[in-house]
Image (cartoon, helix red, strand yellow):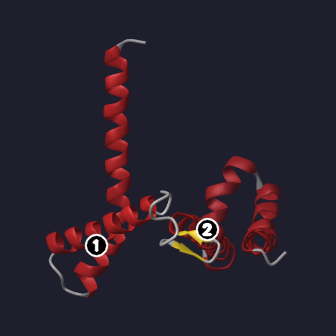
Amino acid sequence: ISFNIWLLFFIALAFAAITSAVSRLEPAVMYLVERKNIGRKKATYSVSFVAYILGIFALLSNTNEFSAALTFGSKNLFDWFDFISSAILMPIGGILVAVFVGYVLDKKVSRDAIVPHTGERFYNIWLFVMRYVAPISIILIMLKEIGIF
């Protein structure tokens, strides 16, 4: 593969990283702008600074020099961030989505989106899974990841 292809690949990768970073910071920035009446530029710099500092500490927690200082319990800071996001926050998000789609979302909206492509029978199975199977399964997986099971 030529050098130009690699160059284009890494430029595309850099753009993907920047857009992902923007989407991660935007909810906190909008909270500060809308609820705390902070200017957008100041809010963006503040949130970016906090994220940068947390990232530096998470990175340093994996080094020999700082791992002892940045270890709490049996996990270093990076491992705590990973554990909280993957074992707690993502399952809670999945449960909330399943409950919202199964109980709150207007059934006409979900039926109109699914039935033309899969049929009424599949829709009924899907709705049952969203209401009962998915939340219970996600809770069980979350409890296992936390270490209760």
Q: Residue furthest bottom?
A: 36
- What residue sits right under mark 2 in the picture? 83
Residue 49: image location, x then y, percent: 26, 68
Residue 107: image location, x then y, percent: 66, 71
Residue at the spot 26% in from the left edge and 80% down from the top edge? 32
Which image quadrant is residue 108 in? bottom right
Residue at the spot 17% in from the left edge and 72% down from the top edge? 40
Q: Amino acid at mark 1?
A: Val
Camera-side residue: 119 or 60? 60
Q: Earlier in the sequence, mark 2 or mark 1?
A: 1
Q: Secondary structure at mark 2?
A: helix
Residue at the spot 70% in from the left edge and 55% down from the top edge? 115
Which image quadrant is residue 39 in? bottom left
The quarter in which the C terminus is drawn is: bottom right
Rate crowding at label 1 as few (under 14), some (14 to 19) or many (20 or more) other CA atoms within 10 Å.
many
Q: CA distance from mark 2 to mark 1?
A: 25 Å
Report whether 36 appears left or right of 139: left
Camera-side residue: 59 or 64? 64
Which image quadrant is residue 102 in? bottom right
Observer-side mark, 2 or 1, equals 2
Whether 135 is drawn above or below 119: the answer is below
Q: Is residue 106 among the parts visible in the rendering?
A: no
Residue at the spot 18% in from the left edge and 82% down from the top edge? 38
- What residue sits right under mark 1 in the picture? 29
Q: Secondary structure at mark 1?
A: helix
Q: Amino acid at mark 2?
A: Phe
